[in-house]
Structures are given as structure tokens and as C-alpha cells.
Amino acid sequence: MPLITLILFPLIGSLVAAVLPTNARNAESTLAGLIALLCTVQVALCFPEIADGAVLRQELAWLPALGLNLVLRLDGLAWMFCMLVFGVGSLVVLYARYYMSAADPVPRFFAFFLAFMGAMVGVVLSGNLIQIAFFWELTSLFSFLLIGYWHHRSDARRGARMALSVTASGGLCLLAGMLVLGHIVGSYELDQVLAAGPRIKAHPLYLVALVLVLLGALTKSAQFPFHFWLPQAMAAPTPVSAYLHSATLVKAGVFLLARLWPALAGTEPWFWLVGGVGLVTLLLGGYAALFQNDLKGLLAYSTLSHLGLITLLLGLNSPLAAVAALFHTMNHATFKASLFMAVGIVDHESGTRDIRRLSGLRRMMPITATLAMVASAAMAGVPLLNGFLSKEMFFAETVYVNAAPLLEWLLPMAATLAGMFSVAYSLRFTVDVFWGPAASALPRHPHEPPHWMRVPVELLVLACLVVGMLPAWSVGAALAAAARPVVGGVLPSYSLVVWHGFNTPFVMSLVALAGGVALYALLRWRSRAEGRTDAPPVAQRSSGQRLFTGALALITQAGRRGRRLLGTGRLQWQLVWLVVAALVASLVPLQVRGLSIGARVLLPLSPAFALLWLLGAACAVAAAWQAKYHRLAALTLMGGAGLCVCLSFLWFSAPDLALTQIVVEVVTTILILLGLRWLPRRDERLRVPTLARGRRWLRRCGNLALALLAGGGMALLSYAMMSRPFPDSSSTFFLEHALSEGGGTNVINVMLVDFRGFDTLGEIVVLAIVALTVYALLRRFRPAREVMNLPPQQRTRPVGTVDMDLSIPRPTADTAVAGYLVVPAVLVRLMLPFATLVAVYLFMRGHNEPGGGFVAGLVFAVALLLQYIVSGTSWVEAHLPVLPRRWIGLGLLTALATGMGALAWGYPFLTSHTARLHLPWVGEIHIASALFFDIGVFTLVVGATLLILTGIAHQSVRSHRHNNAMATAMARGED
């Protein structure tokens, strides 16, 4: 199966899970589990090729001109991380089936879970730097949704926001670093970047690229000083914590360091930055874990410590240290995932995670207690378990490091101290919770969980035992395959055996075990003597969370002060400052470079065209003059100016632009007209004082001068540009290739749906976002009370009006239709099929003649909108449900499906193809694949236009309700 399926299966499964019913917990967990298991098997079947050093590649053309193709590559490192993502993910899905409550919105959980899985695999399989940054930010987004899954809890919302703020900011730095790396290498292809290590390290921008990339990796892996977000993320459900903080999210930073190790490692800056940060995090996380009373908090800080260990190993610039880092990455995923699940079982069955309340659970939960103790022993580095082997390799690398003499002493001592911390907090996890007298007064009576909820923990603990006793047989080949691409193809000499003899690393392990037991005994004595186990005495004074929240508070306060100082609620002044800023920005380069007029021969001036522009300018000035007190007149004059622009397009032989302009002008006029209905009327009783009139005239003169300066400046710039020859024009290419490559003679339409189809896709996405945003704002909009009264013509009906469906629609009580609109109502309903026919005509001819999906969509939307205006909102929605949001979704899906269809056939995204079909009685017809893209544009434009305009039209329903309520109240008062 192609590699792309490893990303598509989870993402498609996410969409399917999102639409499943809330009570289908078994179906949702089965779907997610089958997808994760299927992908695990698919990746596992690739191992024979990967073990031989092969790299499986798949490349899908996306933007080949820019070197941005969808490149997927599976080497040993990617294979190992894919197995962690899918393997641990399948176990977490089984565990979550029993952990999640029936009252939880389970479809949302599995939808987010599968989406995150797909994004994480996208990071691992990416063979392009920009592609890595893209999926990197997707992991931040979906982890935000997972951490904040229980959004009714303030700690979940706070932890999710903090995680997103830190990791997404790091992702922006990573994107900048990837751009710098691509600039240095001359390509964004990962293969070329990894092969250009010496060139990158010798480049003057190496340090810039290194710092930016490290900011992305260290924020994602919660390394100091960005470590504070990880403990706050423990507000997520335990399955999320088990997945994100053992095998996926926090391991993404480790993966990036290992992936770019051949290109960036081996220098002094790498050693001090990566190694120094890893060492601080190793010690700080282990120290803080000793004082946590929440079991998940203890595991969170222990995760920080172990991630610091892996980061330190990658920073030592040693190939053998890199191998040890990958080995500990594998081991950490197994014992940490099992520990998180064990904590979830304890919380699920006892009702609390507070260590101070838990005791003696081994009597009530013997199997769970045994599994948790074995996993915690692996975390502590006890012999015959997998954690012992990788920690021994870590101790060996700190002993044999080649650095400054002081560092050669400090590193082994720091490693031993970190080992003592690990033993101490592992003992606190096991002894305080599972030993001692049985706990009382717990929220629930503890007991063993359902068997299948415990199976994932059993399998992970079994892996800890098998790897600890038979490391070479169990993971030797996988570790070698994963380490080979990291160290450059030639593996260093190492041995995966349980006993290496009585050497310095073994002595360090013994010291760490004995010292950890002593440290735990000291902490236990302190807690009994003082009756408390608080936050770490030193670390609490320099809390990263406190610094982060303080920085956010300062930024918020500064923003509010800036808004009070520079902001204004008046739109006019906002526009003034905007135009002034634009003028200053344009004058600076002109002052430096100057402005000269070209020598291009001018065309003779046409009196008719000059008269047209004078008329348009007069309409524009008159509209501005009348805008404040005569709104309808100003709107009419604005339409006149727009009509002049439309005629100008026709004058310059641009019928497509003219057609679009006239339809957009109609829609804009309707939009403003609907908005004017809800603006309060001018109060004629208000008189402007004489002094205020003088200031008003001064302000108007200033605004006029600013407008003349801005308009005249733009005219001058346009004249300077058009008076120069254009030797290299892109129009020649489009004119020559529109028919041969785009299959159409209408160059404008072919450009929009073929040559620049990606731009059009982005534009319709923006249009959809704008429409949904406006709709959301209008739902909360409430007109002023003085404009809620119905117009006079709607309050009373003319005498003799016959009650009929057109005048008083029976299914709806509140409508804008009264007897005086009977004739317009009949006309607009007769116009609907005619307008639909016109829209279809414009759509079908768009590829060869003026028209297209955008114009056709606007025409059809206007036809539907007329029904709302004349017949009333309630009547239309009772007889013709439009559902514009579904139109928007359908349009986007159609446009995307057209582009993905080209990818499915092996062509770049949105590549157009043409076909000639012979139909009976019709003959030969010419169909381009861009037709379906244009259908998507048409559908989305209809939905977006109707969503915005009907959102305003719905205010009429509120108006009728208001008047009905007032009439009812008056009737009751009379009674």
C-alpha cells in the first residue's frame, strides 16, 4: 500500500468518527482501533526492506515549480516512530473504550484522536522541510483540542491554551528555521538537506537556522525554559496523556532533533545549546517530580526528566549517544504509557489521584498494582528491565564524553543525581500508593478494572520485561535500523546485553539505586515530620508557568493601554489612520528611490471616456457628500460610480470583469440596503453648536485633503507604471496556452480555474471563513429599539385586501409580506426559474465565453435573495429551505475533491484535463475537469452570499416578534 494511506486513513477516520452518533461508543472505538491496527501492520510489513537500509519514497506533485511536492519517505527512524505512533495508539484506543464515560462526547474524542494521529505520522513521514512545518502545526492544533477535550473545566481550557501558545509559537520559529535551511541548501527536500551537513555548518546563517529549529523542537518537547506547559496539560483525559506524553506529541521534538542530527549536530553551538538544555531539564524535571502529590503530575515531571535525558544524549555529538537516545525513546514510550494507563485505572476505580489519600491499593487491585510496580521499576532503571539498559548506555556516554575536564566530572555526577531522583519518585509512585495500610474515605471503593481495560498495560509491561531480558533478540534489529539514518549510515560499535561487567556505569547505577532509596526515605521522614509535601522549595520561586502567565498579563495590559491611547470607536478616525499609515509606507521608498515617468507613447484621449469618468467621479464625490444624512441617495450614487467602473471594463475589452463588476455591484447594493434598514434615523431635533460646526468643516477639509492626496498618489503611481513598457508580460503565456493546456478560449476563466486554481481555492476558502464569521456576528447582533418598529406600510393592510398565501402566508405568522407586495411577490417567483436558467447559461459558457462559476453563483444567489426581500424570511424558509452553510461545505469539498483527483492520477494538485464525449442525440461535447472545480466555486459563492445577506434579513423576524409582543401587551392592557 502507498505511504500516503498511513496519513489518509487516520484523517478520513477522523471525519467518519465525527459524524457517528454520540451513543455509538463501541463503533467509534472499533473504527479507531482498526485504523490504528491496520496502519501498524502496514508499517510492520515494511521492516524487511527498512532493515536492509532502504528508504521507501512516494512523491506526489503539488507545486513542482516551487519545489514543494508532497514527499513521503520511510527510513529506519521514521519506521520506529510510526510503530510507536500506531502501536501505542491502538492500545490507547482499547484503553479509552473503557475509560471514557458514556456521558462524554466520544465521537469528538476519537475524531480529535485520529486527526492527531494522522498529523503526527505526517511529521514523521515528511520528506520536505515545509511539509514538516505544516504537519508540525497540525499536531499543535489537534493536541490543543485533545487537551481541552473537557472544555467545561477551567484547568483543561487553561492547559490547552498554554500548550497551544508555546508549541504553536515554537512552530512559527521552526518554519522560519526551515526556510533558512532551504535557503542555505538551495532545496527543501529532506534528502538534500541531510546530505548537505558540512555546507550548512560552514554557512554564516548556520547559527540562525540552528536557534530557530531548536526553538521549535524544544518547545514541543517541553524542554527548559518551555517545560511549564506539559504539567498543565495533565488536565486532559488520561488516554490523551498516555498517548501525547509517551509516544507522540512530546516525542516530536526528539524526532526532529534526531532527524536533523546529520545536518546540524557536531558543532560547539549544538553541544552547548542542546546538551545544556537537556541537562537542566533532566535535573529540574526529576527534582520537581519528587514533590508532586498528583500521580499524573508526578508522571508529567518525570516525562520532562526523561525527555531531558534523551535531549542531552542527542546533544553530546556522539554517534553512540544518538543510538542510546533512540533506545531510551523506545523504552520510555513503553513504561510511561503503561504508567499513565495505570494511573487512569487508579483514578477511574478509586475516584482520586491524590497520593496523600491513596494507600494499600495492592490488596484491592493486586494485578494493577503488580503491573504499575514493574513499569515504575523500569522507569527507575532496575536491572532486567528495559529502562536499566538505556540508562546504562546514558551513564556510559556521560563517563566517556570528550569535553572540558570540569565537564567530564560534572556530567557523570549530574547523571547519577538524576538517576537518584528517578528511583526516589518511582518509589513514591509505588510505595505510597500500593503499599501501607488500606486507604479509607475514598470517593469510590477500589477494585480491578474490566479485563480489556487492563490488557494494554499488560502488553506494555510485557514489552518492558522482554526487552530488559532479551534486548538483542527483541529490539536489536529495529534499533539498528532506526539509528542508521541518524548517524549517517555507519553504526558505532555497541552491545545490547544485560551484563557488561563490573564497570563505572554499573557502579553509577548502584549508587543511583542506593541514593534514590535513601532520598525517598528522607522525603518520607520530612513529610511525616512536617505533615506536608509541597512544591519544590527552589523551583516554585522560579515557576515557568508564573513567568508565562505574567508575560501574558503584561502583554494584555500593554494592549489595553495602547487601545485606550490610540484606539477609537469611530470608523472614520480608524480609516484616517489607516490611510495615513499607507501614505507614509508608500512615501518612504519613493523618497529613497524617486519616481520617474516612462516614455511610452500615450493613446489619444477619448471625449466619451473622459465624460464617463467625470460622471463616475461626480457620483463618488456626491456619495461621500451625502453619506451621513442622506443614506439612500448616497447608496444610489455609489451604484452610479460602480456602473461607470463596469462600463470602463467594457471600454477596455474586459467583458468578464464587467460582468463580475455589475453582479457584485447588485449584491453590494442589496447588502448595504439591508444594513441601512437597521440603522437609527437621524434626530432632526439635534442642533450642532456653532463652534462644533467650525470644527466639523475643518475636519472635513482635512479629510478631503487626505483623500485627494491618497487618490492622486495612486493615480500618479498607476500612470508611472503604465507609461513604461513591459518587456516580460505573463499575459503572453496565458494567451498562448489557454486553449492548448487549459482547454478553453476564455483566458480569464482558464486562469482562475486552471493555471491559478490554487489561488482561487485559497480565495474561496477565505470567502467561506468571512461568510461564517459575519454570520456568527449577525447572530449576536440586536438592532436598536427605536428601529424595531415595523415600517408604516407593514403595520396596516389596505382596505379590501384579500387574504391569500402571498399576502399573509399561512404557515408563518411573522413575515415582511403585506398586501402592497402581492405583485412584486408574483414577479420574483416567476423570475426565479428564469434567473436559474441564466445562471446555468453563464456557468456552462464560462470556459469559452464571459461567465463562470463565480458570476453564475452571484446571479443565482440574487434570485434567491429577491424571494427573501419580497416574500419574507419565514415564508421562504418554510417553502424553500436553502441551508447556505451546507452549500459552503459542499462547495469546498467539491473543489478539494477536484484537486485531489489530479493527485490520485499522479498529476500535480488541481491539474486540469479535458475530454471529448460523444453523446446520443447531442453529439460531441467538450468537458474539462476544471468544470467540477467551477461547480465548487459556484456552490460556495451561492452559500456564502446567502449566508451573509440572509443573516441580515433574519433581523426582520425579530422585528415582527417584537411588534407582536408589543401588540399583545397593549391588548392585555386594554383588557
Image: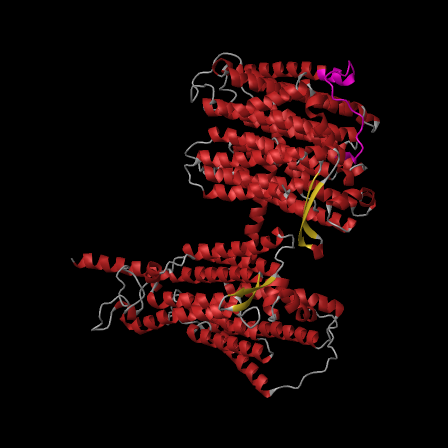
Q: Which residues are magenta?
A: 486-509
- Queried whether the magenta region covers residue 31, the answer comes back as no
- Which of 288 and 337 lies nearest the eye of the viewer? 337
Q: Position of residue 370 (x, y in %)?
A: 55, 16
Q: How is the image coloured?
A: secondary structure
Can residue 291 be seen in this snapshot?
Answer: no
Residue ID at (48%, 56%): 888
Q: Position of residue 539 (x, y in %)?
A: 63, 29
- For residue 400, side relative to residue 290 (left or right): right
Main SS type for the magenta part? loop
Report the residue that reaches farthest toward the bottom.
607
- In the rendered image, which quarter is residue 814 located in? bottom left
Q: Is residue 347 above or below residue 887?
A: above
Report the residue that reaches farthest toward the front.
920
- Which of 26 and 150 lies nearest the eye of the viewer? 26
- Queried whether the magenta region covers residue 488, the answer comes back as yes
Can residue 465 be seen in this snapshot?
Answer: yes
